[in-house]
Structure formats: C-alpha cells, structure tokens
Amino acid sequence: MSEVAPGAEFQFIAHLPQWALDFTIDGNGWNGALPDVHPDEGSTVWGAVFKVPDRQAAALHAIEQEEGRRASTVEAMDRMGKRHLVTTHVSADRNGNGAVAPSPEYLRLMLSGSRHWSLPAGWIAGLEEHLDGAR
C-alpha cells in the first residue's frame, strides 16, 4: 500500500466478525491464488484500517480491480468493540473451488503486516497454516 497510497494513515486495528479469508482469486503472476474475504458465520478476519486520500484511493481501487476485487463497504469492529463502516475489497467473481494453492509470496506479505500491527496470535497462526499448505 505504501507504493500506491503513500499518504495512507493508520487509524486502528479491526476485525470483520462473521467474515472469512479464502484464496479464490487467480494470482496472475503471484504463483498462487490471492486472498478474498466473504461473509461466513463463525469466522473472523483481522486487519489494519487506514485513511487513504481520495486520489490515492482511486489508484488503490484500480489495483484491487486488476486483481479481481471490487470495493465494498462493510462493518468492522475495533479492539474496543466500536463499530465502523470501512471499505474493503472483495472478489468480484468468487470461484470458491480451492483448486489453486495460495500464493506463498502474498502470504508472506500478509504475515509480515500481521506481525507488524500485532494482530491476534490465532490470526497469525492461521496465516502460517495457509503458508505451510502453499509450499
């Protein structure tokens, strides 16, 4: 994100309750599938929320669109339990067949960011399991 949206400012850590992480997007150069989030009862997706300047948000949306995602407004919850409307990117066309293993390179980026922002240990362990399966 720092290359596409250098003006992005960290706001808070949040999770998407009742959402899950899958790897259903054709990686097109990433040597494996890219991540997608989707509603899923009993699951949680963690991440960092950033405020992105409008012009840079357009560039970010364009890159996400190239990877097969579209912007979507969802309700996230911060660590204090406060709800926030945020924009995330979800697959425009989920195949959901799981036939392609996740991209190890992309997973390593996700793990690095998750550790940097001190996301929950269970979230990090889940990403590590995906990485072990991608090798």
Image (cartoon, grey):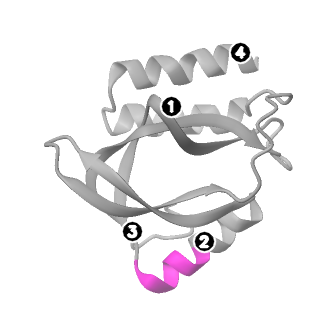
Labels 2 and 4: the sequence-earlier one: 2
- State the CA–CA distance, disc 4 to disc 1: 14 Å
Q: Is residue 66 magenta?
A: no
Magenta residues span 53-59
Q: Residues within 10 Å of mark 4 (few under 14, many from 20)?
A: few
Residue type, numbered disc 3: Ala
Reading the image, the residue beneath label 2 is: 61
Q: Nearer the viewer, mark 2 or mark 1?
A: 2
Q: Residues within 10 Å of mark 3 (few under 14, many from 20)?
A: some
Q: Is residue 56 magenta?
A: yes
Residue at 64% over, 21% down: 131
Where is residue 105 drawn, in percent x and y? 69, 35
- State the CA–CA distance, disc 2 to disc 4: 29 Å
Reading the image, the residue beneath label 3 is: 8
Q: Is residue 10 visible?
A: no
Q: Residues within 10 Å of mark 2 (few under 14, many from 20)?
A: some
> Hey, which quadrant is residue 69 in on the image?
bottom right
Q: Judging from the image, what secondary structure is the residue with disc 3 in?
A: loop
Check the image and name the residue furthest to the bottom.
Answer: 55
Labels 3 and 2: the sequence-earlier one: 3
Reading the image, the residue beneath label 4 is: 133
Residue type, numbered disc 2: His
> Hey, which quadrant is residue 90 in on the image?
bottom right
Q: Is residue 17 left or right of residue 41?
A: left
